[in-house]
Image: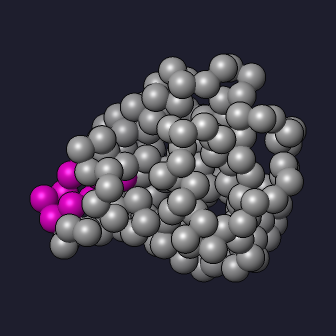
Amino acid sequence: MPDGLSFQADDPARAPVADLLARHHAMMRAGSPPDSCHVRTAEELVGGGAQVFSITDAGGAVVAVGGLSPVAPDHLELKSMHVAAGLRGTGIGAHLLARMIEAAARAGATRLSLETGSGPDHAAARTIYARAGFAPCPPFGSYRSDPLSVFMTKAL
């Protein structure tokens, strides 16, 4: 993983953060049918009470983003985790996930859950989540069973 990474709460309206969130949104929408695509825009994340985080490199460039969205007072959901295309496979995604787990615990969450795709495009994400201790679970919150979705959770 590259040196000099910085993790921080960030403003989803800040141009480089908004750009990466928009790229993530477009990628997810392009690869999933509308009824099975649960990605949110930056505005929807904020409107739903999510806190957005970013990772910047030593030069200050935003290289990854993610959000924590409330499910219940002690239960948060990982949303919109995305690493810039040219940096995937470098460990930044695992670094982002570890920092977001820490942020969820600091916020008082006792459970952290996520929804991701069930297809081959999401295999790397599912591997990162499993390595971080997430296990398959039933749908949570307002989600319903969907063969294109995998639900995972982790006790904090």
Q: Is residue 27 left or right of residue 119?
A: left
The x, y position of residue 121, in whole percent, is 50, 38
Regarding residue 143, the answer to whether it shows in the image is yes
Task: Classify residue 31 as left or right of residue 111.
Answer: left
Question: Residue 51: in sight, yes or no?
Answer: no
Q: Quadrant of residue 23?
A: top left
Residue at x 86%, y 54% (from the top left corner): 138
User: On the picture, is 133 further left or further right than 143?
Assistant: left
Question: What's the residue at 42%, 51% (across, down)?
Answer: 65
Q: How far from the left and from the top, in percent, is residue 40?
A: 60, 35
Residue 81 part of the magenta-drawn span: no
Q: Is 151 or 78 nearer to us in this picture?
A: 151
Between residue 28 and residue 76, name the one nearer to us: 28
In the displayed structure, 74 sits above or below 93; it is below
Which residue is drawn at the image coordinates 37% and 39% (left, top)? 20
Q: Looking at the image, is 134 positioned above or below residue 61?
A: below
Q: Quadrant of the C terminus?
A: bottom right
Q: Which residues are magenta?
A: 56-64
Residue 47 % position (x, y): 65, 40
